[in-house]
Amino acid sequence: MSHEHTGGRHDSVRPDTLAVTAGRPAKVVDAPFSQPVVFASTYVGAPDPQHTLGYGRYGNPTWSALEEAIGALEGGQALIYSSGMTAAYAALELLPRGGTIVLPGNCYLGVASAVDERVESDGVTVRRVDVADTAAVLAAAADADLVWLESPTNPTMEVADLPALGAALTDRVTLVVDNTFATPLLQRPLELGAHVVLHSATKFIGGHSDALLGALVCRPGDPRFDRLLASRSHRGGVPGPMEAYLVLRGLRTLAVRLDRAQANAQVLAERLSAHRAVRAIRYPGLPTDPAHELAGRTMAGYGAMIAIELADAAKADATVERLRLWVHATSLGGVESSLERRRRWAGELPSVPEGLLRLSVGIENVEDLWADLAQALDGLD
Ligand SMILES: *Cc1c(COP(=O)(O)O)cnc(C)c1O
C-alpha cells in the first residue's frame, strides 16, 4: 500500500499549517490542488502485487491523502476506518484474549460496551478508573495489557495527565488514547508515550456533520501499524472514498473552526457558570474547573465541549425543548452548536448525572448562542 502521497516532509511547519498542506498531490504543472475522489473497487494489477494498491479493500488514493494529513498532524502513520467505532474495535484487537484492560470510569459508551463484549467472549478483565487520578491509573496499569484513555472524557470532561502517564507506563503496556475531543491541534498523545491514537473523525476533524469516519494513528515503525493494516485489509471496515474526501475537506479548516468554537465555549462557560439554573459545570477553561491547571499545562487550548448539570432530567429536557438555535442531537464537533441530555440513552452510565447536558459549541456568533441558551434556562422557573 502506498503511503507516500506527496512524499512531503512535515516536520518544519506548525500543526495549523499542516492541516492545510498535508496530503496534497505533488505540486506539478496542471495537478489539482486537492486529491480527487477515486471511486474504484479494484485496480490494474501486476505479477508481483507487493507494492500495488491491488483491491479496493486494501487501499485507495483518496484514503491515502487523508491518512497522510491525519498522520502528519498526530506525528505518526494513520489508518482510516468506516467509523470511530470500527477504529475502536480494531484497536481493541491489540488486547489479547484473557488480557487486562484499564478503561476510564466515564468514557464513550460504545467503547465501554465493545469492551464488555470481550469480557463475555474472551474473558478479559476490565479495570475502570478515574482518568484524572494519575496514581489510580498507574496502579491499575501495573500488570495490564492495554490502557485505554480518553481525555477530556465524554461526556463528563475529566482530563488525564497524559505527559505523566505516558512517561510512567512501561512500553509493555499498549497505551491507546481517544483524542476525539482534543483533536491533534490541542494535544499529540504519540509524542507523550501513547502507542495508538484514536479519532472519531466524524466529529471535529470532519466538522460538518455529514460523514462518518474513524482513524487510528501509530508511531512510525511500530509493528502494531502492520497488524492493524493487515486486519483492516482483511475485515474491510473501510470508509468510502467520498467520506474520505469530505473529511479531508473538513480537516483543512480545523484550526480556524476550533479557534472560533473554543473562544465561543470560553464565553459561554463563564456565563453558564454564573446562571442560577446551572448546578455544576465542567469546562477546563474555567479557572474554577478541577482540570484547569492540568489542561493549561498539557493542552494547547481547552476545546469546545462543555458539560453542565441542571437540577434533574425534567429541567434538562425542558431546556432542550425551548432552544431554537441549538440543535438537539447526539454527536458533536460540527460547525453547528448542538447539545444532548446523555442519560436519555438507556445504556448511558449511571455515573453520568440525569440532568447533565453535553454541549458541543459551534462557530456561530456567540451572542446568538448565549441569547438562545439564556432564554431557555431563564424560563425554567
Ligand atoms: C463519537 C465518538 C466515538 C465513536 O465514533 P463514531 O464515528 O461515532 O463511530 C468514539 N469516541 C468518542 C470520544 C466519540 O465522541
Image (tube, rainbow, N blue to C red):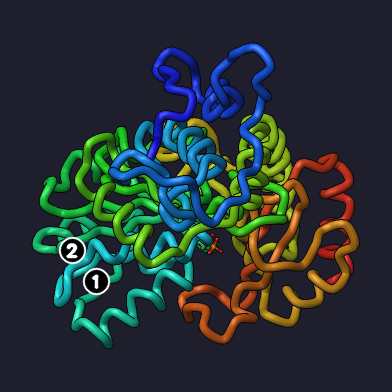
Residue carrying label 1: 127
Relative image position of residue 25 (x, y in whole percent): 57, 25
Q: Nearer the viewer, residue 135 or 92?
A: 92
Left or right relative to 276: residue 235: left
Q: Are marks 1 and 2 in contact (CB under 8 Å)?
A: yes
Compared to residue 17, the image places residue 82 above or below, namely below
- Disc sitting over residue 149 in the figure: none
* Residue at disc 1, CB closer than 8 Å to ligand 1: no
Q: Is residue 262 visible?
A: no
Amino acid at pointer 1: Arg
Amino acid at pointer 2: Ala
Query: Which element carries disc 1, helix, strand or loop?
Result: strand
Relative image position of residue 323 (x, y in whole percent): 86, 64
For the point 79% across and 70% down, the residue is: 320
Q: Residues within 10 Å of mark 1 (few under 14, many from 20)?
A: some
Relative image position of residue 381 (x, y in whole percent): 85, 73
Query: Which element carries disc 2, helix, strand or loop?
Result: helix
Residue carrying label 2: 140
Compared to residue 126, the image places residue 195 above or below, namely above
